[in-house]
Amino acid sequence: MTRIRRGYIARRRRTKICLVASSFRGGHSRLIRTITQERIRALVSAHRDRDNKKRKFRRLWITRINAVIRVIALSYSYCRFLNDLYKRQLLLNRKILAQITISNRNCLYMISNQIIK
């Protein structure tokens, strides 16, 4: 009997999977089963860390705003400042406020003085 030559579809699928894992170390970049496991694990980590990144940036913005506001008035704090912003209907998000604190503190001083009055 003649030998049956297998098709190329499975090999093409495996090479596509191997391209994802080319930077992994050891058998994690060579063995198909471990590649698929590590690929799933990497995707889970990426999804989790995207949320953590948002959380960390929010904490950074809050600490920057709070540091500058406490310099302006000793008894004033971040939470009171944001509460007064919402009462005055000045809708500035934390990212923009943190950029203002870094680049142009005088602008933040003016905003806070208007709110504190």
Image (tube, rainbow, N blue to C red):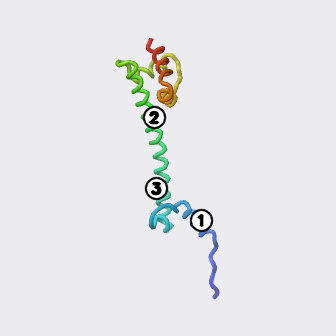
Residue that extends furthest to the left in the rendered view of this protein: 75
Q: On the image, numbered disc 1 is attached to which residue? A: 13
Foreground label between 3 and 2: 2
Question: Sequence order check: which comes first, mark 2 or mark 1?
Answer: 1
User: Distance between the Cα atoms at labels 2 and 1?
Assistant: 41 Å
Amino acid of disc 1: Arg
Q: Regarding mark 1 in the picture, which secondary structure is present there? A: helix
Answer left or right for 17 relative to 75: right
Displayed quadrant of residue 77: top left
User: Distance between the Cα atoms at labels 1 and 3?
Assistant: 19 Å
Answer left or right for 5 relative to 113: right
Question: Sequence order check: which comes first, mark 1 or mark 3?
Answer: 1
Name which residue lies at 50% across and 25% down.
104
How packed is label 1: few (under 14 Cα within 10 Å), some, or many (20 or more)? few
Q: In this view, does 105 lie above or below 17?
A: above
Q: On the image, numbered disc 2 is attached to which residue? A: 58
Q: Residue 114 at what x, y percent from top left?
A: 48, 14
Amino acid of disc 3: Arg
How packed is label 2: few (under 14 Cα within 10 Å), some, or many (20 or more)? some
Q: Regarding mark 3 in the picture, which secondary structure is present there? A: helix
Q: On the image, numbered disc 3 is attached to which residue? A: 41
Question: Sequence order check: which comes first, mark 3 or mark 2?
Answer: 3
Residue that extends furthest to the top in the rendered view of this protein: 117
Name which residue lies at 47% across and 39% down.
54
Q: Quadrant of the N terminus?
A: bottom right
